[in-house]
Amino acid sequence: MIMRPGQQLLLPANPVFIWFTLLGAMLLNTFLSSGIWGRAAWAPDLLAITLVFWGVHQPLRIGVGVAFVFGLAMDVQQGALLGQHALAYTVLAFLAVSIHRRLLWFDVLTQAVQILPLLLVSHLLQLIVRMIAGGSFPGWALLLSPVIESALWPVVTVLLLAPQRRAPDPDNNRPL
């Protein structure tokens, strides 16, 4: 792949780190939903951001199947309609994998703007499934959640790419 000028060559992502971040995001979602905010409609879904990130950066390792399994786990954890998060995360992972080549050519702030519609679709799917099942409308604060998640994209990118930016002992034979 041709790299942009000034783009750093990254080390391969460790699969253990990928799974650790996904499980950590799920546990953090669990902690935040039972903490101060409760199940606030505007609260960001950190697992969704993490799934999009790894779907963009490691599409062969994290894809639709992984998103489906984590979606089912989130449905069980939140006591939501079974399949609500699974459907939303599956569509989100599919969209992330389908735009990953184009998205990586942009800087992080432009990526955040382009991730916003994906996150909005995910939240709208969850809302539609909830409303069809007879749930109540959570309010217009629901529209804040994808905006907050999109604003968190640069932070997530810096944190999750940090282990890949380590310098791999350069010498005369390996200058990179």
Image: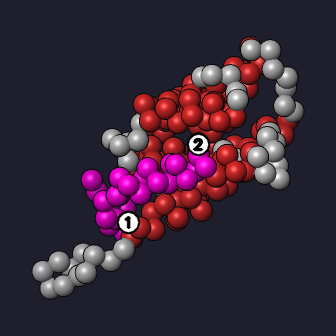
Q: CA distance from mark 2 to mark 1?
A: 21 Å
Q: The C terminus lies in which quarter of the figure?
A: bottom left
The part of the image, by quadrant, that contains residue 33 is: top right
Tell me what residue is drawn at x 25 percent, y 81 percent.
Answer: 169
Name the kind of residue labelled 2 in the image: Ala
Q: Which residues are magenta?
A: 1-27
- Which numbered disc flags the more N-terminal residue, 2 or 1? 2
Name the element at disc 2: helix
Name the kind of residue labelled 1 in the image: Gln
Residue 128's disc is none
- Residue 7 is inside the magenta segment: yes
Tell me what residue is drawn at x 63 percent, y 30 percent.
Answer: 75
Mark 2 Cα-neighbour bin, 10 Å: few <14, some 14–19, many ≥20 = many
Q: Which residue is mark 1?
A: 164
Q: Is residue 166 above or below residue 117?
A: below
The part of the image, by quadrant, that contains residue 124 is: top right
User: Which x, y percent locates residue 125?
Assistant: 66, 25
- Residue 137 falls left or right of residue 43: right
In terms of depth relative to the viewer, which is nearer, 154 or 14?
14
Instruction: Looking at this view, name the residue that lies furthest to the bottom.
Output: 172
The part of the image, by quadrant, that contains residue 137 is: top right
User: Which x, y percent locates residue 55?
Assistant: 44, 43
Residue 48's disc is 2
